[in-house]
């Protein structure tokens, strides 16, 4: 009986020592566990935002570069690149865009980041899925490129064999350009300041050439064969910078001033649809295979307009600002500016 009691006591003491040793091992020898210092580096998804409108993601890299990815509620995408410096002692982030810098105080944890600017703030949460900023907007590839006959922020068209190019403020002529040599092969006289030109999508010799006018809220229709003035549209938004013919009676027009596009029936003189693009300042347009291609903010967007409005794809041409677009039956052409010079660029992009 005494032996049994002693044996029981030894077992109890051994169990207690084992438990205490196990706790000591878990606590790293009695010291508190090492906590990782939260870092601002990584991919962050915007939760609340009253500073960078339409921003969706911030990608903060170890090499002190930063990418801000944008997308508005219509689907228009954009991107902005910057460098940054991080004052970890003061918890301050300086973002340098090259043309301007922004200073933000921040708080950070493993899952949350808050940037407090002098006149606004952004709350972000850690994104576990890696995002490649190079794939946010598709980069267009160049097939061929040449100098435009003049430099204006204009839309372009295709007449079956030549690029048709407006001349903006110069109300004298519309240019006809050889797509292989980029030589100016001829002109069409005009009194309009043609920021936008378009050839009617109509399989007939008697067709229109459409022209916009300087600041005017109408576009005009001329007979393509003899250049006689035939008609004009109802008032739309001012500064018509893009025209895209659908068929022999309907056409899309864009108003740079009103940030809107209009579907117009020139047979019945009726505005069929008006779509507000919310400060996108649209320029050139082209309509192909049921999709409307829109030049805006120096980029190109493919949009579904069959039922409402939705951006399907966003494109950029690095180092160029795109303002006009046309389709030659195989590939798209754009009018773009590079280093303040007008360029005609054939793209590796087909419908």
Image: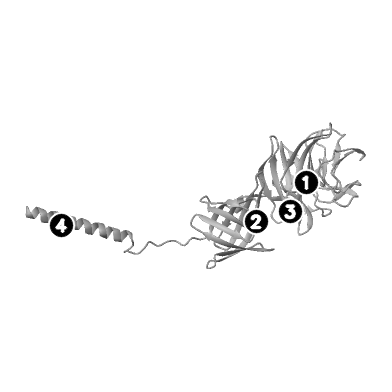
Instruction: Pick whichever of labels 2 and 3 is earlier in the sequence.
Output: 2
The image's mark for residue 10 is 4
Instruction: Pick whichever of labels 4 and 1 is earlier in the sequence.
Output: 4
Task: Residue at the far top: name it.
Answer: 268
In the structure shown, which secondary structural element does the residue marked by tag 3 occupy? strand
The image's mark for residue 321 is 3
Instruction: Pick whichever of labels 2 and 4 is earlier in the sequence.
Output: 4
Residue labelled with disc 1: 258
Of labels 3 and 4, the one closer to you: 4
Distance in Å between CA atoms under marks 2 and 4: 71 Å
- Residue 339 position, x and y percent, is 76, 59
Distance in Å between CA atoms under marks 3 and 1: 20 Å
In the structure shown, which secondary structural element does the residue marked by tag 1 occupy? loop
Residue labelled with disc 2: 80
Instruction: Pick whichever of labels 3 and 1 is earlier in the sequence.
Output: 1
The image's mark for residue 64 is none
Report crowding for label 2: few under 14, some 14 to 19, many 20 or more residues within 10 A (C-alpha): few
Position above or below: 141 against 105: above
Instruction: Pick whichever of labels 2 and 1 is earlier in the sequence.
Output: 2
């Amino acid at each position: 009986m005494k032996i049994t009691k002693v044996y029981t006591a030894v077992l109890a003491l051994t169990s207690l020592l084992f438990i205490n040793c196990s706790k000591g091992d878990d606590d790293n020898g009695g010291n508190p566990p090492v906590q990782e210092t939260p870092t601002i580096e990584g991919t962050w998804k915007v939760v609340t935002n009253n500073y960078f409108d339409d921003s969706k993601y911030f990608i903060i890299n170890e090499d002190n570069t930063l990418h801000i990815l944008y997308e508005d509620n219509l689907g228009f995408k954009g991107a902005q690149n910057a460098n940054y410096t991080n004052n970890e002692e003061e918890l301050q982030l300086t973002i340098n865009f090259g043309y301007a810098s922004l200073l933000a105080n921040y708080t950070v944890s493993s899952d949350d980041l808050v940037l407090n600017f002098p006149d606004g703030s952004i709350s972000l949460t850690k994104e576990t899925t890696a995002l490649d900023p190079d794939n946010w907007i598709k980069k267009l590839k160049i097939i061929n490129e040449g100098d435009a006959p003049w430099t204006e922020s204009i839309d372009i068209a295709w007449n079956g064999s030549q690029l048709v190019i407006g001349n903006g403020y110069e109300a004298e002529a519309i240019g006809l350009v050889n797509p292989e040599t980029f030589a100016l092969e001829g002109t069409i006289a005009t009194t309009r300041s043609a920021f936008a030109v378009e050839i009617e999508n109509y399989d007939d010799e008697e067709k229109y050439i459409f022209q916009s006018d300087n600041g005017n809220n109408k576009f005009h229709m001329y007979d393509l064969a003899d250049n006689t003035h035939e008609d004009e549209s109802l008032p739309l938004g001012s500064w018509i910078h893009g025209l895209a013919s659908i068929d022999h009676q309907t056409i899309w027009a864009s108003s740079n001033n009103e940030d809107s596009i209009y579907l117009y029936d020139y047979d019945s003189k009726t505005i069929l649809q008006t779509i507000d693009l919310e400060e996108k300042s649209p320029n050139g347009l082209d309509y192909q295979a049921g999709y409307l291609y829109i030049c805006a903010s120096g980029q190109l967007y493919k949009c579904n307009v069959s039922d409402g409005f939705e951006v399907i794809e966003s494109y950029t041409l690095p180092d160029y600002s795109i303002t006009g677009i046309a389709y030659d039956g195989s590939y798209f052409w754009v009018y773009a500016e590079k280093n303040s010079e007008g360029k005609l660029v054939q793209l590796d992009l087909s419908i």
